[in-house]
Amino acid sequence: MGAKINGEGGESDSLSMETGPDHHESGNAAGSQQSLDTIEISGSIKWFDAGKGFGFIVPDNGMADVLLHVTCLRRDGYQTAYEGARIVVEALNRPGGLQAFRIVSMDESTARHPSQMPAPRTHVVVEASSGMVRLEVKWFNRIRGFGFLSAGEGSPDIFVHMETLRRFGITELRPGQFVLVRYGNGPKGLMVAEIRPDGWGEAPSSH
């Protein structure tokens, strides 16, 4: 089964970026070579870190892990991939190992949702001391991996870490967006302990 790489520029550009310096051929010859190197693999998500932009698939057939890049996910309409999700991909056998080129299907019914996983140890986890309140996103930077929420003018900003978002299945925040949170005291001030999308359950406004 060959991957469709001729046609719209988005896929061609993505292929060029992902194959990088190992991709020496050009034109139709290159397309034919990449198609020959493409194999269909079924497996499950070993782990995926949206912040780092990649993760790995464990194939069912015992082959080496398959690299899954965020550009491949998003080109095929997915925002992230949860640990344990079943996935079928077309992969390129590159010198550095197997790399997913196209997602054929993904079944998240077997996935471990981030909120079910143990809290990561890469940042401080605080115990909630507040009730659930509705706060506005003041600023958030995915590259830096953190941001701040506002409870209104005159109130201290509340720090939110990217790892906390991942625990509760949220991939990003936008300034001006409202979210529901519980927060507590961290080493350097107030920090989010739990975060949910606006409209989840019922929560009083902080204003």
Image (tube, grey):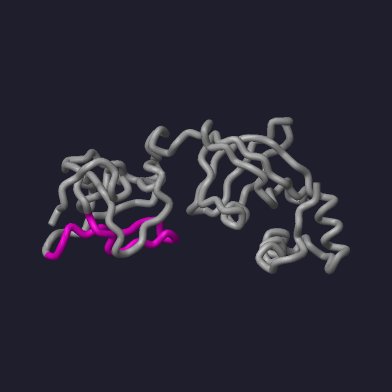
Task: Name the foreground residue: 82 vs 178.
Answer: 178
Say which quadrant the C terminus sits in: bottom left
Q: Would you say 32 lies left or right of 130 here?
A: right
Q: Is residue 150 above or below residue 40?
A: below
Q: Position of residue 52 (x, y in %)?
A: 52, 53
Q: Which residue does the image show at 82% across and 53% down from the upper left? A: 35
Q: Which residue does the image show at 82% across and 65% down from the upper left? A: 24
Residue interval drawn in magenta: 135-153
Q: How many marks?
A: 0
Q: In which quarter of the view is residue 33 placed?
A: bottom right
Q: Which residue does the image show at 23% across and 48% down from the upper left? A: 187
Q: Is residue 139 above or below residue 106?
A: below
Q: Position of residue 3 (x, y in %)?
A: 76, 53
Residue farthest to the right, as pictured: 29
Task: Name the foreground residue: 45 vs 163.
Answer: 45
Q: Position of residue 124 (x, y in %)?
A: 31, 44
Task: Name the foreground residue: 198 vs 156.
Answer: 198
Per the image, is 36 magenta? Answer: no
Q: Position of residue 131 (x, y in %)?
A: 17, 42
Q: Would you say 4 lies left or right of 71 here?
A: right
Q: Which residue does the image show at 79% across and 48% down from the upper left? A: 38
Q: Is residue 64 above or below residue 155?
A: above
Task: Name the foreground residue: 21 vs 140.
Answer: 140
Q: Is residue 192 above or below residue 20?
A: above
Q: Would you say 19 lies left or right of 200 here?
A: right
Q: In which quarter of the view is residue 147 placed?
A: bottom left
Q: Main secondary structure of the magenta part?
A: strand
